[in-house]
Image (cartoon, helix red, strand yellow):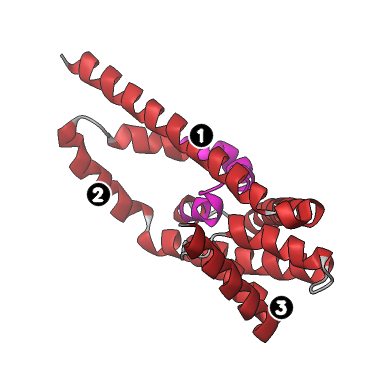
Amino acid sequence: MGSVLTDLVRWVIDVVQSLGYIGVFVLILSGSLYLPVPTELTLPLFGFLIGHGRLSFVPVLLTATAARVCAALVLYAVGLRLGEARLRRVVKHFERSKLLFVSDFDRASRVFERHGGKAILVGHLIPGVGALVSVPAGLKRMPLRWRFLGYTILGCSIWNSSLIGLGWALGGRWRIVEVFTSFVGFSVLTVLIVAILWLFWRRRRAHR
């Protein structure tokens, strides 16, 4: 596993050396679209390279933010194209299992409508979520200007500057950032799994 990570790091550095900030854009866009180039790895690595004078902070931050916003727009379009009516039909099929009801979908929709902007902002700050939060935004047709783009740019800027800055500050120990964000992502996933199991148990108990 260590050799695979080392090869990935070497490949990322080669891409940046060959393509410059275009390479930064492509790598961040790929990671934000859930291709196997995680931003939890590349952003701290860019910070490390900034510390060694091979990149500059502001261009990296602007390029990385532009890439993540582009990824968010792609996933927003996916939600927009899917449409609420089609998703509602899918949810209706799950009613037979007594696990999910259209009323649950309606309730979730109302929550997103009330806290949509905050959901977009917070989603970009949770490892493993990132641009994926843009799908329900597209589904609910959240206004692109200025609500969706505003919260997306803010969330992406905070995430990018934090990981780049930590990689810069930690120097040769920049990989600690990836370990930390992986731990946070695992913790969030664990909480979600526990919550789903609890809801499943409560729903089964209510139908007995």
Which label sits on residue 171? none
Can you give x and y, in whole percent of width and height, for residue 119 in the image? 58, 42
Q: Quadrant of residue 197?
A: top left
In magenta segment, residue 203 = no
Can you give x and y, in whole percent of width and height, for residue 157 in the image? 73, 56
Between the C-alphas of marks 2 and 3, the distance is 44 Å
Which residue is labeled 1 in the image? 187
Q: Is there any visible trace of residue 27 in the rendered image?
A: yes
Q: Is residue 163 left or right of residue 92?
A: right
Q: Quadrant of residue 15?
A: bottom right
Which residue is labeled 3 in the image? 21
Between the C-alphas of marks 3 and 1, the distance is 33 Å
Q: Label 1 is placed on what type of residue?
A: Ser
In magenta segment, residue 120 = yes
Q: Label 3 is placed on what type of residue?
A: Tyr
Between the C-alphas of marks 2 and 1, the distance is 32 Å
Can you give x and y, in whole percent of width and height, for residue 24 in the image? 66, 73
For the magenta stretch, what is the residue range?
110-135
For the C terminus, give its image quadrant. top left
Mark toward the start of the polypeptide (3 vs 1): 3
Which residue is labeled 2 in the image? 89
Q: Which element carries disc 1, helix, strand or loop? A: helix
Q: Is there any visible trace of residue 126 in the rendered image?
A: no
Q: Residue drawn at (67%, 56%), measured in percent from left and top? A: 156
What main secondary structure does the magenta stretch of the protein show?
helix
For the N terminus, give its image quadrant. bottom left
How crowded pointer 3 is (Cα within 10 Å; few <14, some 14-19, many 20+) is rated as some
Q: Which element carries disc 3, helix, strand or loop? A: helix
Q: Which element carries disc 2, helix, strand or loop? A: helix
| Furthest residue in direction bottom, as rendered | 18
